Image: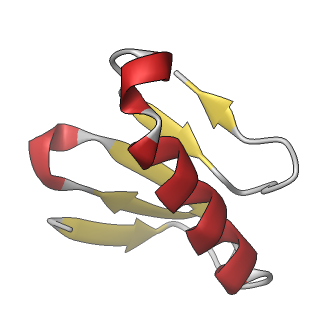
Amino acid sequence: MNSAKAESDSTVELELDGGVTVRWGDSTRGNLKAEVLAQLVDAREQTGAVNVYDVSSPEHPVLE
């Protein structure tokens, strides 16, 4: 991880190596968000290039 920023308690964003952004959201369900993020990163071959992983709603992650 390169950096983290938060405009508010509910808008936490992380920047990973390579400039990839993770929209984390708020501090709730951190374990689930981490698990979902790990699975998405591991699935890079299937998803192709991703600039943003949005796990703020871990049941419905968004890739950009």
| Residue in the picture at 47% in, 36% down | 43
Q: Is residue 57 visible?
A: yes
Q: Quadrant of residue 10?
A: bottom right
Q: Position of residue 36 (x, y in %)?
A: 64, 58
The N terminus, quarter of image = bottom left
Q: Is 10 on the left-hand or right-hand side of 57?
A: left
Seen at 37% across and 45% down, the residue is 21
Q: Residue at x 87, y 52 (%)?
A: 59
Q: Quadrant of residue 8?
A: bottom right
Nearer to the camera, 5 or 38: 38
Q: Is 63 above or below relative to 3?
A: above
Residue extending furthest toward the right: 59
Q: Left or right of 62: which side holds 51?
A: left
Q: Is residue 31 left or right of residue 7?
A: right
Colouring scheme applied when the structure was drawn: secondary structure
Side of 16 where 51 appears, left or right: right
22 versus 12 height, above or below: above
One can see residue 25 in this view: no
Q: Please give the name of the residue rendered at 78% of the width and 57% of the height, measured from the top-left corner.
A: 58
